Image (cartoon, rainbow, N blue to C red):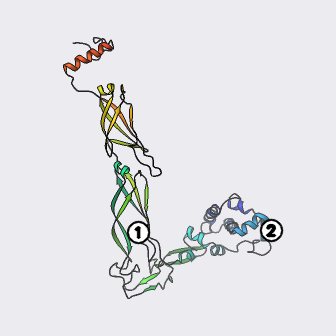
Amino acid sequence: MSSQQDYYQTLGVAREADADTIKKAYRKLAMQFHPDRNPGDKAAEDKFKEAAEAYDVLSNSEKRAQYDRFGHAAFKQGGRGFQGGFDSADDIFSSFGDIFGDLFGGGGQKRSSRSRTEPRKGADLRYLCEISLKDIITGLEKEIEFETEENCKDCNGSGAEKGSQVETCSMCGGQGQVVTRQGFFSMQTACPQCRGEGQMIKKPCRTCKGAGRMEKSKKIQVTIPAGVDTGTRLRISGEGEGGYRGGSPGDLYVEIRVKDNDKYERHGSDLHTILKVPYVQLLLGGQVDVSTLTSEEKLEIPKASQPGSQVKLAGHGFPSLRSQRRGDMFFHLEAEYPKKISAEEEKLLKEIAKIYKLDETDPKSGFFGKKK
């Protein structure tokens, strides 16, 4: 194996690559050339050692700086013996146990040795909350109920009956995992005696039956501010799952979902609706009574309004979470025609038709079609 090959080329990364990129590149090569995947292949074993040698230098900021400045010459005087690299795969496993713990389930014992009895934060929870369009304008206080879990109060999460003690597992020494090796291959599995807990409970708590945790139904009051929208997430600190063994609780994330409304639509901060207006009033204009989401208002219809045009009612849309401005409300006008007309109405309409010189005998031009 030549130790003079450029380490960046060995790992296939650029010289400016960050630590995560270097680690990912090494993991990929380690998986490709691992001795257990290439039994008896001397070339693969050499590649495996070359990759480890390159990673050992480039993953260490001090060594990497020396290498970038002096190249391989930086390690010719002592150090870790880079003239020959690593002596064996076992040497590599012992140096990069965390890498192989992730890849192959072995060598990661150091990282997994954190006791499961240490305080640990509870999980964050998500709650989906449906509100109406009106709620967006006014905001609201809402009581929500959800299921969570927390430490058993009788045993304080230990799982052991009061007065008894939790004992360290004799098989794994409290690690929660055991490691077996076959040649270069290491396998790390949950301890069969303590089931990965690292501890043994001789007298389980009667309340939680040794689980240390209890399910709980929880009710809290949530303030939903005006101006929210579908997808808005409100973080309620400390209202998530209870912490483990004295750890802090998680957070609750309330996700907003706005219910559809058959009559109104939201477009950003503006509110839109359809307003049916008698055709005569579209022509003559004037005030009409309209309903917003929160009030009754007067709306001025301009003269000679066309069906499909829109009229704005300023300041009756939605508030914003980030500013004091409130959107507007838009009424899309539709002409409303009577199903029947009286003789007087017909007479007046015919007079109007004469003004427009409409030939009522011509079905293509008249209001009323061809006479029978």
In the depicted structure, whether residue 275 falls above or below residue 30 = above
Q: Which residue does the image show at 70% across and 74% down from the upper left? A: 87
Q: Is residue 2 visible?
A: no
Where does the image place residue 42, in percent across and percent down from the top left?
A: 68, 67
Q: Which residue does the image show at 28% across and 12% down from the upper left? A: 360
Where does the image place residue 115, in percent across and percent down from the top left?
A: 50, 78
Q: SS of the residue at dot 1?
A: loop
> Foreground residue, 146 or 235?
235
Disc on the earlier residue, 1 or 2 = 2
How crowded is the residue under tag 1: few (<14 C-alpha within 10 Å), some, or many (20+)? many
Q: Which residue does the image show at 39% across and 44% down from the upper left? A: 317
Residue matched to label 1? 241
- Disc 1 from disc 2: Cα separation: 55 Å
Q: SS of the residue at dot 2?
A: helix
Q: Looking at this rendering, what residue extends furthest in the bottom direction?
A: 163
> Foreground residue, 149 or 182?
149
Mark closer to the observer (1, 2): 1
Where does the image place residue 273, in percent across and percent down from the top left?
A: 35, 39
